[in-house]
Amino acid sequence: MHTLSIPTWIIHISSVIEWIVAIWLIWTYGELTNNRNWWVLSLAMLPALVSAMCACTWHYFDNAESLEWLVTLQATMTLVGNFTLWAAAFLVWRSTKSSNTVEPKPIKLEQ
């Protein structure tokens, strides 16, 4: 009754893999731009990854009642992840806003 279909498992597993790749890409972007705020964003993504892994684990064991604490952990990690992602996104936004305040050079027109 609780077993997920193969297409649903594919979506669950591919979503976790995509999230791991996104974390790695954002970390790498932070290294390339030397902007540590991107590193903070990649670390802020970890609670959401834990949440997804809780869901996959619970489903893998056929939604066992003995593992119902995973549902609570998943909900908690989703809440924590939403706040950490908000805070990290704000830091990235603030860092890009301050770097965009450079005055443009005037264009000289030849006559």
Image (spheres, helix red, strand yellow):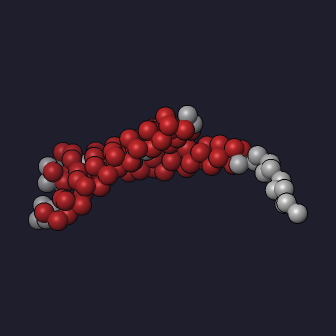
How many labels, in total? 0
- On the rendered image, what quadrant is the C terminus found in? bottom right
Rendered residue at 61%/43% (across/down): 91
Q: Nearer the viewer, residue 24 or 4?
A: 24
Rendered residue at 20%/63% (across/down): 8
Q: Nearer the viewer, residue 10 or 110?
A: 110
- On the rendered image, what quadrant is the N terminus found in? bottom left
Q: Is residue 106 visible?
A: yes
Q: Is residue 72 visible?
A: no
Rendered residue at 81%/56% (across/down): 107
Rendered residue at 29%/55% (across/down): 15
Task: Locate residue 18, reporting x and y percent.
Answer: 32, 52
Q: Quick check: 84 above or below 63?
A: above
Q: Nearer the viewer, residue 89 or 79?
A: 89
Answer left or right for 95 relative to 60. right
Task: Locate residue 84, reporting x and y percent.
Answer: 51, 44
Residue furthest to the right: 111
Q: Quadrant of residue 59?
A: bottom left
Answer left or right for 57 relative to 104. left
Task: Locate residue 41, reporting x and y percent.
Answer: 50, 42
Q: Quick check: 34 above or below 67?
A: above
Task: Locate residue 46, reporting x and y percent.
Answer: 40, 41
